């Protein structure tokens, strides 16, 4: 049985993008990105909303040859090897390999997929994650906190959601980023 994880890089004040939609301040350095690769190797399926999918599909054709930083090439390989499910009512088709387009998020279908999975699933993007969190199907919440305050934007977690959490892991990086992983407990 796989676990459903929600992982994001956030500002200290809890945003994944600032008020202009920019997340350039969240660019991980090589140490953080290498660690991301280590934890993403266990993901067999990514669940995305349209906007997150449009950002992440870069990895479908990201350079992996000479001249590319090894940690970037490694992430491209990890992403390309995983299945992707995109939930969108407006996307005409999925434009990457190993990708299925679904018109609506069905929590029961995700539960069934999770129960049958031999690898973990990852939900990407705060809108889709909110639905999964509210349905009680997220098993772990993982957060990379970047040492910056952006003052507003797209929140990592939704308002009016209460969950019990148990700390699984924590890590500090030389650039000031802090990683926190929690198991959702009820």
Image (cartoon, rainbow, N blue to C red):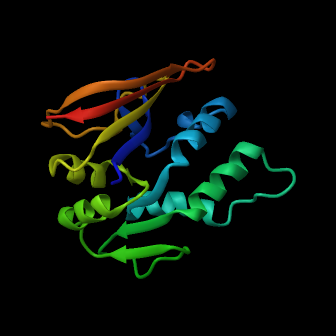
Please count the marks in the image: 0
Left or right, 30 with reference to 149: right
Among all residues in the image, which is located at the extreme bottom? Answer: 92
Q: Where is residue 173, by image quadrant?
A: top right
> Residue at left 28%, top 76%?
103
* x, y percent for residue 186: 13, 35
Q: Is residue 94 above or below residue 154?
A: below
* x, y percent for residue 51: 41, 60
Locate the N terminus and report the quarter of the image it occupies: bottom left
Q: Is residue 75 above or below residue 108?
A: above
> Residue at left 43%, top 57%?
52
Q: Where is residue 112, by image quadrant?
A: bottom left
> Residue at left 32%, top 47%?
126
Given residues 108 and 21, the one toward you in this image is 108
* x, y percent for residue 26: 53, 35
Among all residues in the image, which is located at the extreme right? Answer: 66
Left or right, 79 with reference to 136: right
Left or right, 110 with reference to 30: left
Q: Is residue 58 visible?
A: no
> Residue at left 27%, top 38%?
157
Left or right, 72 with reference to 137: right
């Amino acid at each position: 049985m796989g676990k459903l994880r929600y992982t994001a890089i956030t500002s200290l004040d809890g945003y994944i993008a600032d008020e202009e939609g920019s997340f350039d301040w969240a660019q991980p350095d090589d140490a953080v990105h290498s660690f991301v690769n280590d934890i993403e190797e266990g993901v067999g399926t990514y669940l995305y909303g349209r906007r997150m999918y449009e950002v992440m599909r870069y990895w479908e054709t990201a350079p992996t040859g000479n001249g590319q930083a090894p940690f970037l090439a490694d992430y491209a390989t990890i992403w390309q090897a995983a299945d992707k499910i995109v939930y969108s009512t407006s996307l005409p088709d999925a434009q990457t390999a190993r990708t299925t387009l679904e018109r609506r998020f069905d929590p029961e279908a995700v539960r069934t997929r999770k129960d049958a999975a031999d690898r973990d699933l990852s939900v990407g993007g705060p809108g889709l994650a909110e639905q999964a969190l509210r349905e009680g199907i997220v098993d772990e919440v993982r957060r990379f906190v970047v040492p910056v305050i952006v003052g507003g934007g797209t929140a990592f977690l939704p308002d009016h959601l209460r969950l019990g959490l148990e700390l699984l892991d924590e890590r500090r990086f030389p650039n000031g980023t802090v990683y926190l992983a929690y198991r959702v407990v009820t």
